[in-house]
Amino acid sequence: MLCALLRFVPPACAQSNADVSINSSEQLFSVMAALNMAGYDSGLFVRTGDDTRQDVRDYLAKQKIPVEAQLRAFYAAHRNANDPGKDFAQYVSLALLLGNPPQFQFTIPAEDLPPDASDIRDLVPLVETFYQQAGLRSLYARLQPRYADAIQRYAGTVRREIALSDAYLRFPSGSYLGRTYHIYLCLMGAPDQVQARIYGDNYYLVVTPSQQPRFKEIRHQYLHFLLDPLAVKYGAAIHQKASLAAIARKAPLLDGDFKNDFSLLVTECLIHAVELRMDKPASAQQQANADLTSGLILTPYFYAALADYEKQDAPISVYYQQMIQGIAVAKMEKQLASVKFANPKPASQPAASAPLSAKDQLLDQGDNFIYIGKYDQAKQVFKQVLKQYDPKSARALFGVAVAASNTREPDIAVEYFNKALATAHNLRIVTWSHIYLARIYDIEGMRQKALAQYRAASITAATFPEALAAVQQGLQRPFDGSAR
């Protein structure tokens, strides 16, 4: 059985050069230790079977650390009290882009940091000071046996899941084209957190303690690691089926990123189908149909197509194109016409079940105008949002910019893309704003400015197959305006 190279590196060592690794991160430990001293108490008393977080907090509470007051003030000013998950997530994003202590230098240009990390970049000097004053180097070293035990809890099952995924998709070992998948165990965060990131060629999954290890999430992200490049490679074939996106856009439960990136939707549907084929639950077909009504409209198709894949010997890297070409658009449109998409359940999702506000209705209307190519109408709708509801709405600013770009108004487009970048936290908006700016600069003959924008987009583009393809093409040759 051909399987991925999975190395379990002693946590105190530098990150592995292997394709897949499970480890701890001293940068992540340092950031989260600082937050725990600064007032980060989310999930503190939930039992997980691991006491590392409380023990570190007790140790720090006994120290006289001069920078503590500044850390407390910083955390209070940036705390997201209404969403503990987002509160934790921003610090994960920051830590993943920091170099080794004690300097903690950014691994990418500071101006290219993702929005959530950029918002809290001023924390880094405080963490650097805290690292020295609290003696974190020796503390982290003393905790290595605990991290080794935590890693061992995951090691066998993670190795098995990765080997089975490689075997099912028939991926040969070492065929990752320089990409890496890092799993970091963070013992200092609130329980049951799973945070996935893709920065450049690196896939990350940060997992905090839980009574039941999160193996399904680890495998799901690993399947993205394997399959995302195929969506880029066969982007042209996927684009031929993109009219189906209009149907998926009607699903109330479907995430906005899937509505706006058909290649991303295709990959997610395929991954769900692979998971069903690998797990073989008795309710597999019902689960595939539930995916369909949630907006993952291609899950049933891929679930059936994978049955044929299993009967032949080609790897998924070869069979993938055949599956995409086998999507009969006209036939599927007819089948999907009778599908009744599911609505949010008021009992479990009270916020999502609330009617859309007038502002959100206008934003959806503007997005739909963009989708069908009515750019002048889109511009009017988005400007109405900016005037009547929110002059800093990143979605509206981006919408005006996209509309202006498609109506040959580069000056307006540049102005609004830059305004969107100044306010946006949505990675799709940030990534595509950089790409559009790069294309405008290419058309105007400013290649160096274009390359800077493509490089900025490359940090987060891998999350979105269509964006990644655009970045790769833009770095290879100037955009000439022939495609948008």
Image (spheres, rainbow, N blue to C red):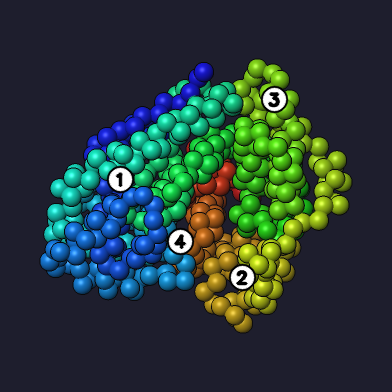
Quick one: label 4 or label 2, which is nearer the N terminus?
4
Q: Which amino acid type is marked by label 1?
A: Ser
Q: Which amino acid type is marked by label 4?
A: Gly
**Picture residue at 63% right of the left edge, 24% below the top:** 318
What residue does disc 2 label? 351
279 over 89 or under it: above or below: above
164 over 28 or under it: above or below: above
Quick one: label 3 or label 1, which is nearer the N terminus?
1
166 relative to 94 in the view: left or right: right
Distance of label 3 from label 4 (alpha carbons) = 38 Å
What residue does disc 4 label? 85
- In the image, residue 332 lies at what x, y percent? 82, 42
Frontmost of labels 3 and 2 is 2
Image quarter of residue 141 = top left
- The answer to whether the residue labelled 3 contacts the one labelled 1, judged by CB atoms less than 8 Å apart, is no
Quick one: label 2 or label 1, which is nearer the N terminus?
1
What residue does disc 1 label? 25
Q: Which amino acid type is marked by label 2?
A: Ala
- The answer to whether the residue labelled 3 contacts the one labelled 2, judged by CB atoms less than 8 Å apart, is no
What residue does disc 3 label? 309
Q: Which amino acid type is marked by label 3?
A: Tyr
420 over 178 or under it: above or below: below
Q: Secondary structure at mark 3?
A: helix
Image quarter of residue 363 = bottom right
Distance of label 4 from label 2 (alpha carbons) = 16 Å
**Picture residue at 50% right of the left edge, 32% below the top:** 161
Frontmost of labels 3 and 4 is 4
421 relative to 277 in the view: left or right: left
- The answer to whether the residue labelled 1 contacts the one labelled 4, judged by CB atoms less than 8 Å apart, is no
274 relative to 25 in the view: left or right: right
**Picture residue at 66% right of the left edge, 33% below the top:** 280
Distance of label 2 from label 1 (alpha carbons) = 35 Å
